[in-house]
Amino acid sequence: MNIKLVTTTYQEDIKNTNESIKEFSFDRGVEMKVVNLYPDMEYQTFDGFGGAITEAAGYTFSLMSKGNQKRILEAYFGNNGNRYNLVRTHIDSCDFSVSQYAAMNDPADTDFNSFSLDRDEKYIIPLLKEAEQTAGKALSVMLSPWSPPAFMKTNGQRTEGGSLKPEYRQFWAEYICHYIKQYRNKGFSIDMITIQNEPNATQPWDSCLYTGEQEKEFLRDYLYPVLVANGLEEVEVCVWDHNKERMFERACEIIDEETDKMVQGIAFHWYTGEHFDAIKLVHERFPDKKLIFTEGCVEYSRFSEAGQLENAQMYAYDIIGNINAGMNAFIDWNLILNKEGGPNHVGNFCDAPIMCDTENDIVQEKLSYTYIGHFSRYIEPGAKRIASTKYTDKLEVVSLKNPNGSIVIVLLNRSHEEVPVALRLGGQVTEFSVPGSSIVTGVI
């Protein structure tokens, strides 16, 4: 038995990735510097990795040369790239749109005669089509609304929070279902939706507030019945779709004996800290629900001084902690952005794993892209998390067993010191070192 090790280091702003093979030998009683793997101890199933095709990403993509467009597509969806199988996109505009828009704005048009996906057709749908062509298969797509049309809201605008007017709850549920059906008519597999992006945040961009009770009532009395009436009951509904620190409370507020069948998952973001124990709490209370990371990025407003290594480590640390706590899928935010970190119609600029200089047709793969790939290139959809133990807090460790029986272990070393490892599995052991400030993926 052997293990293939893929190691990425980053020193003096230079990335270096190399591969090596280590053989296992009989375990003669090693006790020190041990990391254990226990494949028979299985936990949650992992559904895969993905990113968001926002209008900003699609617009940026459209400005690149055909050669660089192909490079970007292969980097994310190609068999030799990060092999994404999940996509999230927005219902109507979000902050990472070129400007605000809605598919229709007529309060009297309950038959959706004026409904149009023209904006989606310009930038989002072309990129989604090419992503699927590159992947060679249908991608699993999640739709998330940032705000209902302005006429449906208490503040009369898409921005600055506000709430859904009670008299428009049925109309808004029908609108969401119409959006799903229109995307399906274009051949896309809309498998998942969230009820509202960040329902606890009043933002200067597209946003809408829901209390736990309001989200529950909208789901129970309007959205779910309309999904059923439209033959869309198999679309998985995820609640919350906001930061981890309140995900347990929101799940408890919404899920009861009546709504249990209506909720397939809890979606969460990372912007308020790690809160891995919150994920674990939700998993313990609701073990049959999927826990899906639906958004995270490096915000320039908060992390402008951080370097590529810190940003990449933030991704890897969160992915490892989330999976170990029970996460079932990871969907990053924007696939690509321009060199300013946009476009964003309110200037909320952020980093992305791949950045594009659209003026000079230059593609920059950030270290975060490589770090995400240390997971997504090797962990297959349908993998099971397995048990592991470690001897030091200098390492973050996660391990999974793929459907074909191969075992993947990812080790993150955020310290500057080399960390030795004696990896034990089934009565055998192999030894190697994890360099300082590195990430290592092992495949057995």
Image (tube, helix red, strand yellow):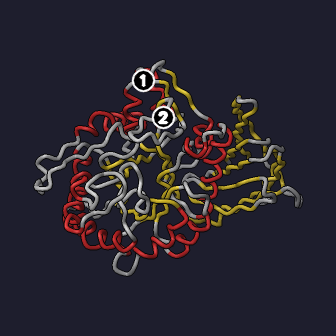
Which residue: 61% across, 55% down?
A: 401
Find the distance from the CA under tag 1 to the CA under tag 2: 18 Å
* Residue count near mark 1 (Cα–Cα under 10 Å), binned few <14, some 14–19, many ≥20: many
Describe residue 54's horizontal placement relative to residue 111 as left or right: right
Q: Amino acid at mark 1?
A: Met
Please provide percent x and percent y for residue 289. Answer: 46, 68
Numbered-mark total: 2
Look at mark 1 in the image and give the residue it sits on.
Answer: 64
Q: Amino acid at mark 2?
A: Gly
Residue nearest the observer in this picture, 131 or 159:
159
* Residue count near mark 2 (Cα–Cα under 10 Å), binned few <14, some 14–19, many ≥20: many
Please provide percent x and percent y for residue 197. Answer: 40, 56
Direction bottom: furthest residue: 257
Please provide percent x and percent y for residue 164. Answer: 28, 63
Direction top: furthest residue: 360
Which residue: 33% across, 60% down?
A: 162
Q: Quadrant of residue 108?
A: bottom left
- Sequence-earlier tag: 1 or 2: 1
Look at mark 2 in the image and give the residue it sits on.
Answer: 78
